[in-house]
Amino acid sequence: MQGFDSKFKTFPDYILGITNEIWEQRGVETLNHYYADDIVVRSPASVVIGNQAVIKATYATLDEFPDRQLLGEDVIWSGTPEQGMLSSHRILSTATHSGDGVFGKATGTKLTYRVIADCHAINNQINDEWLIRDLGAIVQQLGWTSADYARQQISDEGGAEACIKPLSPATDVAGPYQGEGNEDEWGQSYADILTGIMSGDDTVFDTRYDRAAIGEYSGDHTAIGRPDISSFWAGLRNSFPSAQFTLHHQIGRTDPMMPPRAAIRWSLSGKHDGNGRFGPPSGADVYVMGISHAEFGPWGLRREYSLFDDVAVWKQIHLHTGSL
């Protein structure tokens, strides 16, 4: 781990360690050390530049969810300490809505939701990040629909003109990491699967997924078996049938005591011109940022985790239609 603090023995150890230090040990100010001054953090909701903005947002989240735990399920990574490394870190979070904040007055509701964060690190510091929080799962557990919360979010932020605009190619900012992952066979296998799904090849589910596969998806949705998994992906793709599907980053790994795994960051960009997960077509220009993880077994893909932000999609639709 050249260039990194000696207390971190591996890159996953670094990612898991600093996450615990920042959030659960309440070492928020260590972000001054672990995050670059000019870091670019992209989420479906916005683009944030600079570690001071990240620190402010972290404190706000802890005020609203003071007992939040971040349980690291996996870190799928590529690169070298000398050249820089990219981690795709999947987190299962538990938290109690104990404080007032962006989700309204405290309700005492106990939440469980997933996050996937792609982070580029070199010399003991993260300088580029892509972050997806399952915001749909959070608001559903608090009693909202994603569509209604998106509408409320626009109002809370000052209306259609003043509100924070979701991530899109027009709002994105180039950061220092320009890598595309690695050429491992499992990353390529998963890239082929997702490309097949997005091109409408329904045979992918019977030929590439284990019959007992389980998917954990946006909106706190668990899909069991091929028909349920196929239905989840159809709901997304049918909403944007003409949208451009792009693979931005792929990693494959085989590690001791772990199944072969893959992490893919992808996007859909185009018109909401179909009837699916997001209701009747609105004609809105929509950008969907997604990150997916897969685990493989002897009979195909056996575990899949895929996140995008339902609220950010609905926000783009509402801003187009004026349904505020």
Image (tube, helix red, strand yellow):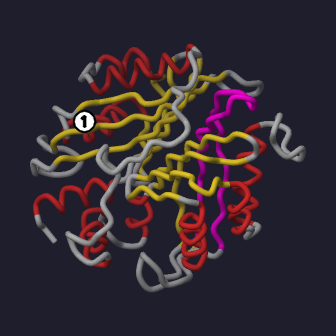
Q: Horizontal and vertical percent for residue 37?
A: 62, 57
Q: What's under tag 1, amino acid-wise?
A: Arg
- Determine if the magenta segment contains residue 70: yes
Quarter occupied by residue 296: top right
Whether residue 27 sits left or right of residue 242 in the image: it is: right
Q: Horizontal and vertical percent for residue 268?
A: 29, 37
Name the image quarter holding the C terminus.
bottom left
Whether residue 26 sits left or right of residue 251 in the image: it is: right
Whether residue 256 sits left or right of residue 38 in the image: it is: right
Name the image quarter holding the N terminus.
top right
252 or 67, nearer to the observer = 252
- What's the residue at 63%, 34% (across, down)? 76
Q: Residues within 10 Å of mark 1 (few under 14, many from 20)?
A: many
Q: Horizontal and vertical percent for residue 247?
A: 40, 28
Q: Which residue is mark 1?
A: 237
Q: Main secondary structure of the magenta part?
A: strand
Q: Which residues are the magenta region? A: 67-95
Q: Is residue 64 above or below residue 189?
A: below
- What's the residue at 59%, 16% (across, down)? 184
81 or 192, nearer to the observer = 81
Provide the secondary structure element on which disc 1 rests: helix
Instruction: Tally the marks.
Output: 1
- Determine if the magenta segment contains residue 273: no
Quarter occupied by residue 259: top right
